[in-house]
Amino acid sequence: MRMPHMAERGPELPMQRDLIDRSNASLKARLALDLESLRGSLQRSGTLLALDTTLEEIMDRVAGFEVVLPSWGLGTGGTRFGRFPGPGEPTSIFEKLEDAALVQQLTRGAGAVSLHVPWDSGASRALSECAQGLGLRFDAMNSNTFQDQPGQRLSYKFGSLSHPESAVRRQAIDHNLEVIAIGEAIGSKALSVWIGDGSDTPGQSNFRRSLERVADSLAEIYKSLPGDWKLFVEYKPYEPAFYSTVIQDWGTALHLCQGLGDRAHVLVDLGHHLPGTNIEQIVSRLIQVGRLGGVHLNDSKYGDDDLTAGSIRPFQLFLIFCELVAAEREARKSRQMSSPTYLIDQSHNTRDPIEALIVTVEEARRAYAKALFVDFERLAELQDASDPVLAELVLKNAFETDVRPVLAAVRLRDGGAIDPIGIFRESGYRLAKARERKPDWKTAGGMV
């Protein structure tokens, strides 16, 4: 759902409005030329006529596309070898919300935040008031049973929801129920569950019994969901378990969801796949059976890398959005609108987290916008005619369309920045926060 214009809510904006206005004023004329050049090109090629649409209608669709910001992505991530947080990074959930509001102010495409418990702590009322004051809302809640927390009674070293000991499973289940309660208090409508359960050596665990224990644990969590909530089950082929992972692929996640009920859906993380995996086909299959709950936006080079979305495989990202847009078109025709949650989930190790999030918001919107220029009717004709050359060209023509003027025009129209990265750097926001925020090198960043 598209958020109302900031002026209608009157939130406390992190950046001065006149700074954005001055930057936009200096770029408006060039943007107008770029937009008209694109319009002329689309008219000459017959693209808009074939799609029976206008550039303004495309812009409206792009404006309605929104991604969710991860609270843990507002700080520096890291690897198992170390982390290098930068100055001015948030050290509390309230400071994370302030940074999230800046990303939304500049992009106008990221008005919701996803929290991770217990990384994010704060009284529910205070969180709600802070988010509302910044013009934000809360999306899916994330539980954490893949690492031990200070003061935790039982360890998850050998698993959580799949642990052989019932007491450990009970502790993990209770944690998820606590996360649901927090989410209810702040307006969330979904719980996202990812567990690192698995084994490192052959014979360490029983494959079938481990999965049965996860199914039983998830069933108890599912029964406690509020009636209007969804449960997202995420899968991951490896890490931290290196021999076997209990929920290792989309088929296993789907099997679990089908056993739980209609409100259980699979969450597809674009980085959590082995090299060469046909992710767009996985997305298509889950759409086909009505079980695609969400997409974690990132990218990978070797495996589970959590790189910035579109940084490695922009064409694959486009192909994934082609499947999503095709399903969206069919849903619009049948008036059964149902859209997955688009959540950023990536690790910022050397980039400024705010800049990296801005880039991914725009990359997701770029892939979505390009998919809107696919002539799906022509594509279907070519598929039925078994013409692989022209069918591929239909996709390539859309992929090669320069939609940057569309994205910039949407940001400008909705009160954002034509050049969000440029204005962020010009503003000196990060340096100002470095002076305001007390540095905490142990907790700076997201994943702690």
Image (tube, rainbow, N blue to C red):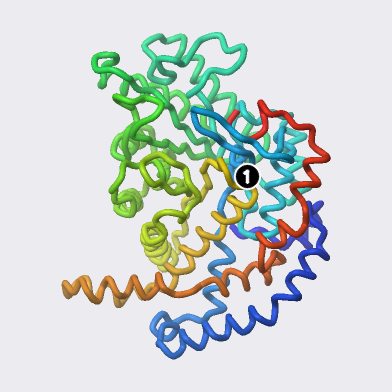
Taking depth in this image into account, of 259 and 276 the one nearest to the observer is 276
Residue found at x 61% / y 84%: 33
Question: Disc 1 on helix, strand or loop?
Answer: strand
Residue found at x 31% / y 49%: 282
Residue 320 visible from this viewpoint: yes
Residue type beneath disc 1: Val
Residue 228 visible from this viewpoint: no
Q: Is residue 38 left or right of residue 198?
A: right
Q: Where does the C terminus fall, quadrant-wise? A: top right
Q: Which residue is mark 1?
A: 113
Q: Is residue 30 left or right of residue 315?
A: right
Q: Extreme left residue here? A: 386
**Picture coordinates of residue 23, whole percent (x, y):** 75, 69
**Picture coordinates of residue 184, whole percent (x, y):** 63, 34
Taking depth in this image into account, of 19 and 154 the one nearest to the observer is 19
Residue 3 occupies quadrant: bottom right
Instruction: Give above or below for 409 relative to 365.
Output: below
**Picture coordinates of residue 106, whole percent (x, y):** 69, 59
**Picture coordinates of residue 179, whole percent (x, y):** 58, 28
Residue found at x 66% / y 26%: 442
Q: Is residue 313 left or right of residue 230?
A: left
Instruction: Give above or below for 217 relative to 340.
Output: above
Taking depth in this image into account, of 131 and 96 the one nearest to the observer is 96
Residue found at x 62% / y 44%: 113
Residue 96 occupies quadrant: top right
